Amino acid sequence: MEAIVAYFSGLNNSHVKAGIQRLNCSESGDNNAFFSFLNRLQRFLFIACLMPMLSQGAQECTKIVISGNPDYPPITWIDSHGATPMRGVAIELLEMAFSELSIPLDAMHVGNWKRAQHSARTGKIDLLAGPYQTTERNEYLEYVEPAFMQDPVAIFFKNGHQIDIDDWSQLRAYTGARPLGHQFGEQFDSFAQQNLKFYSASSIQQLFEMLVNERVDYVIYGLNPGLAEAAKGGFSNEITYSSNFISSEPMYLPFTISSPCRQYSDFLSKKIATFIETGVVEELTTKYLKMLEKQISVSD
């Protein structure tokens, strides 16, 4: 019994100490008291261990912090000077959905797409706007079905230097480029890693510059974002693309697994389905493409 008393003597909880003292005083007799105390102690320790988890689970979703790719119009993007918050189809869809619950959104620019994914992985944001689904991302994102739109992935070439591509294997003879942190479907990514030569850069504008200067033979990027970024950078007349797409990937609005806002996954799922069915996604895509055209014409 003295060994048990010594073991628990360092505990600060007064109830535990009192229980040990009572047992010590009645050592001569009643084993039932000893086992009764151990049962109470077991329950106490179980609740003590459970409390942090209950506290974490009870966290409220008072604001949804979002980030995405700053160079992926019309889905998500920021102005080149970065003076305005992130905007685009994905951001406005989320604003429309959560306005019903009066939950504010904070669309943060945390850096390039690779940094946005890192912010999701480390729990610094609640929701990542517009990623494809991959095995790696499944480890830190809770995907909300359905996808809100499809994203055709194109091969861009310099005008006059197009390559007729019917099969990925034909790209082996050429040098390509892709932005840092981008995936273009797990099948293509696996093939590219084993068979293709790529250069990478942090922005699509840098890659288009490499393309028109003939430092690379082609660039892989989403079709609509690629055309918009080419126009922004003044490359529209110098760049073309193949009508044979690499893939067409679904884009999602997933919560991070550490976010207390995950509790609204089912709610968001229903809102996305409604937005698709009623044509809201298509309307917003048209709206932001026109906005981009206007911005580009003004800057010209």
Image (spheres, grey):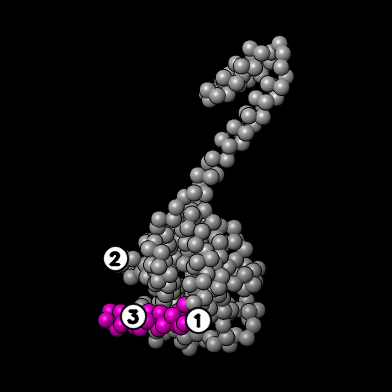
Q: How far across and how far down the image is residue 268, in percent? A: 49, 68
Q: Say which amino acid is labelled 3.
A: Met
**Residue 51, numbered label:** none
Secondary structure, mark 1, is helix
Q: Neighbour class for label 3 at 10 Å: few (<14), some, many (≥20)?
A: some
Q: Quadrant of residue 75?
A: bottom left
Prevailing secondary structure class for the magenta stretch in the rendered image:
helix
Magenta segment = 275-300
Which residue corresponds to mark 3?
A: 291
Counting other residues with Cα less than 10 Å from the Cα at mark 2, is it few (<14), some (14-19), or many (20 or more)? few
Vertical order, 191 against 170 (above or below): above
Instruction: Say left or right for 89 vs 11.
Output: left
> Please, is residue 149 above or below residue 28 in the view?
below
Q: In which quarter of the image is residue 257?
A: bottom right
Label 2 or label 1, whichever lies nearer to me, is 1
> Which of the two residues, 20 or 110, is positioned nearer the viewer here?
20
Question: Which quarter of the image is occupied by the C terminus?
Answer: bottom left
The stretch drawn in magenta includes residue 112: no
**Side of 293 relative to 244 (left or right):** left
- Please name the residue that numbered disc 1 is placed on: 277
Q: How far apart are marks 1 and 3 (CA)?
A: 24 Å
Task: Give me the residue at 50% from left, 81% from top.
Answer: 277
Which residue type does callout 1 highlight?
Answer: Glu
Instruction: Answer with the quarter of the image where residue 192 lies.
Output: bottom right
Q: Is mark 3 on a helix, strand or loop?
A: helix
Q: Where is residue 290 in the image (x, y as percent from the top left)?
A: 35, 83
**Label 2: which residue?**
83
Looking at marks 3 and 2 on the same chain, the residue that comes earlier in the sequence is marked by: 2
Tell me residue 298's x, y (percent): 27, 81
Residue 65 screen position, x and y as percent: 41, 59
